[in-house]
Amino acid sequence: QLSLGPGGFVSLLEQTAGVTDTRVIGKPSREFYNAALSVVGVTNPAHVVMVGDDVVGDVKGALDAGLGRALLVKTGKYVHGDELGRKTEGVLPTLTVDSIVEAVDHICSTFDGL
């Protein structure tokens, strides 16, 4: 199955707007995580928990950006074995859970008031 990535859309928007210096950022780039933290006013990324189903974009991206924890949820993009670090150069999720509910329960039960 073929799909169009963001490049074609960006090119179209650049041409339409007469702009040529567009920059696209997204997971798993550190720049993406830093921008997201800045928008919500977080000054210490070690106090942030990322919850996601993508071991590369969510887990590795978050931990590489300095977030405190990254929980992998076995839904959506998750593939059996993602938690073993084969796709992430050995970077492992802090915890792997079956559902977002379990992730939230874990976060609430380990919250230390930071």
Image (cartoon, rainbow, N blue to C red):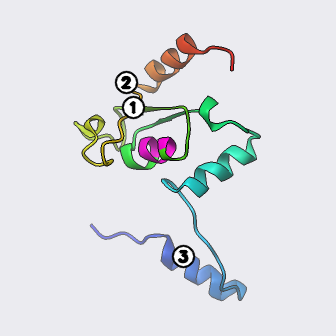
Contact (Cβ within 8 Å) of mark 1 with mark 2: yes
Say few, some or many: other residues with alpha carbon within 10 Å of mark 1 (under 14 / 14 to 19 / 20 or more).
many
**Main SS of residues in magenta:** helix
Q: Position of residue 20 (x, y in %)?
A: 65, 86
- Residue at 33% in and 47% down: 88
What secondary structure is found at the residue carrying circle 2?
strand
Q: Nearer the viewer, mark 3 or mark 1?
A: 1
Q: Determine which residue is flagged by label 3.
A: 9
> From the image, which quarter does the C terminus lie in?
top right
Name the disc covering residue 102, or none: none
What secondary structure is found at the residue carrying circle 3?
helix
Q: Nearer the viewer, mark 3 or mark 2?
A: 2
Q: What residue type is labelled 3?
A: Phe
Q: Determine which residue is flagged by label 2.
A: 97
Say few, some or many: other residues with alpha carbon within 10 Å of mark 3 (under 14 / 14 to 19 / 20 or more).
few
Q: What residue type is labelled 1?
A: Val
Q: Give the range drawn in magenta.
A: 58-63
